[in-house]
Image: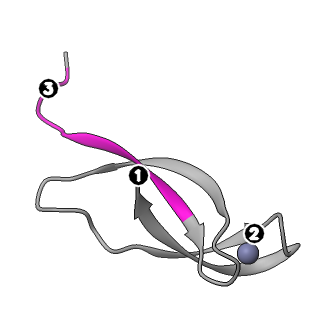
Amino acid sequence: MAKKSKREYVWLECSQCRSRNYRTGVSVAEGTPKLELKKFCKAERKHTVHKLRRK
Ligand SMILES: [Zn+2]
């Protein structure tokens, strides 16, 4: 029973074409962390910076 960690599902949105390519779970202890990750964008077929976006 893990009820301590508060998890929330967010989207990783491409900063170039705004397509939401990934869904991930993050812990939101003190608000949503600002994450920027280099991910592969399917729409553009290249690696771009993806930003965390809440639904
Ligand atoms: Zn893209």
**Disc 1, disc 3: CB below 8 Å?**
no
**Magenta stretch bounds:** 2-12
Instruction: Give the amino acid at mark 3.
Output: Lys
Task: Please give the name of the residue rendered at 54% of the width and 62% of the height, measured from the top-left corner.
Answer: 12
Q: Residues within 10 Å of mark 3 (few under 14, many from 20)?
A: few
Q: Which residue is mark 2?
A: 40
Task: Please give the name of the residue rendered at 24% of the width and 63% of the height, measured from the top-left corner.
Answer: 32
Q: Earlier in the sequence, mark 1 or mark 3?
A: 3
Which quarter of the image is occupied by the N terminus? top left
Residue 38, given in percent of the width and then of the height, sits at 62, 77
Residue 55's tag is 1
- Circle 1 sits in a helix, a strand or a loop, which is it? loop
- Circle 2 sits in a helix, a strand or a loop, which is it? strand
Q: Is residue 10 magenta?
A: yes
Q: Nearer the viewer, mark 1 or mark 3?
A: 1
The way the protein has been coloured in the rendering is one colour
Residue 3's tag is 3
Instruction: Give the amino acid at mark 1.
Output: Lys
Residue 23, given in percent of the width and then of the height, sits at 55, 48
Q: Earlier in the sequence, mark 2 or mark 3?
A: 3
| Vertical arrangement, residue 46 with respect to residue 4, above or below | below
Ligand 1's quadrant? bottom right
Instruction: Give the amino acid at mark 2.
Output: Phe
Could you give the CA–CA distance between mark 2 and mark 3, rounded to whole angstroms?
A: 33 Å
Taking depth in this image into account, of 22 and 3 the one nearest to the observer is 22
Residue 19, given in percent of the width and then of the height, sits at 67, 66
Residue 39, given in percent of the width and then of the height, sits at 67, 70
- Circle 3 sits in a helix, a strand or a loop, which is it? loop
Q: Earlier in the sequence, mark 1 or mark 2?
A: 2
Q: Nearer the viewer, mark 1 or mark 2?
A: 1
- On screen, residue 23 versus residue 47, left or right, reads left
